[in-house]
Image: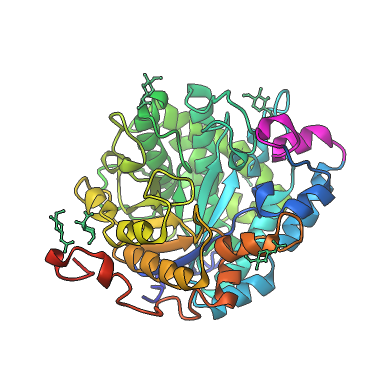
Amino acid sequence: MRHILAGVVLSGTLAARAWAGQLTNIHGVNLGSWLLLEPWMLPQEWLNMGGQSCANDCSTCISTESSFAKAYPDTVDTTFAKHWDTWFTQDDVNTLKAAGINTVRVPLGYWIVEALVDRSHESYPRGGLEYLRRGLGWLQDAGIQAILDHHALPGVQTAGQMFTGNCTSDVQFYTPYNYHRALVWTAVMTALSHLDPTFGSVFAIEAINEPIMNATLTPGYGNFQKNFVQVIRAVELILGIFVPSSSLSVSVSPSVSNNFTAALSATSSESIFPVEVQTALLEAVPILLEIGIAFGLQTIFEASPFIQSRPPLVTNFMDINWQYDNPSNPADAAIGPQAYDNHLYYSFGGVAAADPKSYLISICNLTRIQADAAVGNSPLWFGEWGLSTQFTATDEFLYKWADAQKLAYSKGAGWIYWNFKTEISTLTNGSALARQWSYLEGLKLGFLTQDPAAYHDPDVCGPYINSTTNSASS
Ligand SMILES: *[C@@H]1O[C@H](CO)[C@@H](O)[C@H](O)[C@H]1NC(C)=O
Ligand SMILES: *[C@@H]1O[C@H](CO)[C@@H](O)[C@H](O)[C@H]1NC(C)=O
Ligand SMILES: *[C@@H]1O[C@H](CO)[C@@H](O)[C@H](O)[C@H]1NC(C)=O
Ligand SMILES: *[C@@H]1O[C@H](CO)[C@@H](O)[C@H](O)[C@H]1NC(C)=O
Ligand SMILES: *[C@@H]1O[C@H](CO)[C@@H](O)[C@H](O)[C@H]1NC(C)=O
Ligand SMILES: *[C@@H]1O[C@H](CO)[C@@H](O)[C@H](O)[C@H]1NC(C)=O
């Protein structure tokens, strides 16, 4: 349960840090709407910022970061800086720590790596990386591990969603150009995770949040999964990090052993990696040099021995069963530690009939963990879930609903609630929203327990499991 401190000081300039990552008993929350704002979670603040609320179709008004940036090119960065500064704070970290939260998932847009934005037709706020670094630093000090979640992909990975940063029906992620940009993002994030001292709490990087479920519409995704893992492992091999079960190896020439960016550049021509991986590594070099200048990391990136004994990152994918119609299996891409993510919301329909008993029968009999394990998708955590329902839920039901879900997800690697908080304003009744979507509000109301490993009733599933299966843990 405890973090394993595995960092070892190999040089005077690199601090020992980093843990191997806790892959069981994950009790987590998402830091949603922080560096990737979804207006439905903070409707009043969004209007105050200058955003709009569209009736049905989010593509018809200012309801995403990109439409906002397009509407307010001169003020977008300062408006968002204020949001980043206030939506997630040191106080929140203290509260989460006191509530026993051990993991956060941090949804990010590709534009956090600003050089990847094609400003000729894309617009996004600038300056988020500074706030990410600050927040990760707080989390590290609190001993809370972090997943960097690539939540909004270049070109948009799914249609009509605020969480992609650009609400559109024109989905362009599944193309060579945008896969490539996502790989460069991955190379940059991997290097930061291992070298930037503020990223010490990062133990996993998630490739794509919620790709299109119909695998026929995601051509090339399987190949991307393999390249994603190889980009991470290539950066790690350069850093001297031992990658288990890897047949890959990289030797760094002594002439570049004091300049990580130069070693990255030299390695990018190693033909053991596919061309796609090589070019992503190469294109990460100037971006890292720029970030080094902006954040005072030049000595670390360019003028220090960089060999590390940190454990490798956990590569993280939505599980194979997220998709249908002959999906590629992310397990086939694994080199070293890998984990899987499933999201389960009952409130959007399609899971169980819209009544309390059906919900409990469904969750108490959940078979997703076994189904995933049977095809190598283990460990599995539930990276998004909540208390939301399609019917008006009584308090009495929500106690059970929280317990039953936590029990189900804890049979896998654990759970990460969506979201750590939502706005409580009078607009659209924020109390009702927070009651079923905010972890902190759920704690206050008592549906979620102050000790996240506790239950109001550990036998909540008893009446809802087929008696022939004997016990709730079968
Ligand atoms: C949003 O996506 C559409 C469709 O791909 C694209 O034409 C547009 O440039 C994007 N907008 C921004 C601001 O990124
Ligand atoms: C998946 O997408 C393909 C291509 O558009 C389509 O032919 C197929 O009917 C879709 N599958 C389902 C179940 O919607
Ligand atoms: C480190 O290598 C990079 C990439 O080759 C180069 O641009 C930079 O000037 C080098 N820095 C130092 C301090 O030598
Ligand atoms: C808002 O939601 C809360 C919690 O569900 C409820 O108690 C309250 O009556 C609602 N207020 C209005 C004005 O609908
Ligand atoms: C258990 O499940 C089986 C098969 O679905 C069913 O025939 C049986 O009636 C169930 N028993 C109970 C007690 O629900
Ligand atoms: C789940 O529970 C219900 C109610 O006891 C039972 O009928 C059913 O067979 C169980 N199993 C599955 C896989 O639904």
Residue 207 in percent (x, y) is at: 45, 43
* Residue 134 or residue 27, whichever sits in front: 27
* Residue 211 or residue 154, whichever sits in front: 211
* Residue 381 or residue 403, whichever sits in front: 403
Report the magenta residues as a range: 55-74
Q: Quadrant of residue 163?
A: top right
Going by the image, does 35 lie left or right of 313?
A: right
* Residue 357 or residue 76, whichever sits in front: 357
Can residue 9 be seen here?
Answer: no
- Quadrant (top left/top right/bottom left/bottom right) for the C terminus: bottom left
Name the quadrant where ligand 3 sits: top right
Residue at x-position 29% and y-position 65%? 411
Residue 60 in magenta stretch: yes
Residue at the far right: name it: 74
Going by the image, does 409 lie left or right of 432?
A: left
- Quadrant (top left/top right/bottom left/bottom right) for the N terminus: bottom left
Residue 108 in percent (x, y) is at: 59, 47
Residue 333 in magenta stretch: no
Going by the image, does 164 lie left or right of 377?
A: right
Q: Quadrant of residue 330?
A: top left
Placement of 160 over or under 374, stated as above or below: above
Placement of 240 over or under 457, stated as above or below: above
Residue 256 in percent (x, y) is at: 50, 45
Residue at x-position 26% and y-position 72%? 462
Residue at x-position 14% and y-position 64%? 469
